[in-house]
Amino acid sequence: SYTSSNARMISAYLRAYQVLGDPHFRALALGVLDLLYAERYKSGLGMARLVVEEEPRVFGLLEDQVAFVRALCDGFQSTGARRYLQRAEALVADLISGLGDSAGGGFYDRPQSSPKLGLLRMPYKPLETNLRASLVLSELFYLTGQPLYRNQSERALRFVLSTEAALPLASLGSAVDRLTRYPVHV
């Protein structure tokens, strides 16, 4: 099973816990979150996409990194356990160093060290995933106060806005709103 799909399910279960208050949802989500982090995270490489024959494989895909950082932030917000926030920050450091475009902003879909067969020779920065990255980086900025995350969120947005491709307007609006509007704290 892919890391990004699992991470989205973790976030959904944690959201269900927040809405319904059923501790079973939270316990299940946190168990999977901890297990995936333990078996798939490697410092400097990020999250592996999957595990084959008990070995993590295909490290550093943007989709997996972004979805897992989101799940870690959700884990922190559901528990207050700092380990989830620390793990999110470590994973974002790998994301920025491994996938970030320091010249043009935004993030590539895979590490530059990936195999370069066929169309994989051409670097690609997916708009929708860059917008999700901007959202989660804004969230991490609000949780930590670290300006680096806000800066990276803004750079991803600037990249998306600089393209001539059709823009996913709903996602763009959400990312801009999240970056510019401080969240409500109760």
Image: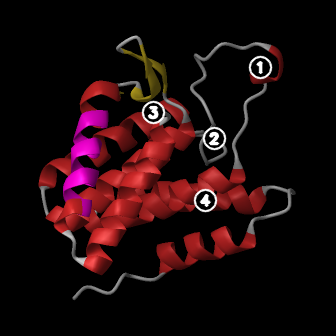
Which percent across, then down, holds residue 25?
A: 26, 62
The structure residue drawn at horizontal position 77% and vertical position 19%, both measured from the top left corner, is 121
What separation in Å lies between label 3 and label 4 (alpha carbons)?
A: 18 Å
What separation in Å lies between label 1 and label 2 (alpha carbons)?
A: 19 Å
Disc 4 marks which amino acid? Leu
What separation in Å lies between label 3 and label 2 (alpha carbons)?
A: 13 Å
Horizontal side of 119 relative to 77 (left or right) equals right
| Mark 4 Cα shell of 10 Å, populated few (<14), some (14-19), many (≥20) | many
Q: Upstream in the sequence, badge 3 or badge 4?
A: 3
Q: Which residue is mark 2?
A: 103
Of circles 3 and 2, the one toward us is 3
Q: Which residue is mark 3?
A: 97
The majority secondary structure of the magenta stretch comes to helix
Say what secondary structure mark 2 lies in. loop
Q: Upstream in the sequence, badge 4 or badge 2?
A: 2
Contact between labelled residues 4 and 1, with CB atoms less than 8 Å apart: no
Horizontal side of 71 relative to 176 (left or right) equals left
Q: Upstream in the sequence, badge 3 or badge 2?
A: 3
The structure residue drawn at horizontal position 29% and vertical position 39%, both measured from the top left corner, is 90
Q: Which residue is mark 1?
A: 121
Q: Which residue is mark 4?
A: 131
Seen in the picture, residue 168 relative to 7 is either above or below; the reply is: below
Disc 1 marks which amino acid? Arg
| Mark 2 Cα shell of 10 Å, populated few (<14), some (14-19), many (≥20) | few
Q: Upstream in the sequence, badge 1 or badge 2?
A: 2
Q: Which residues are magenta?
A: 25-36
Of circles 3 and 4, the one toward us is 4
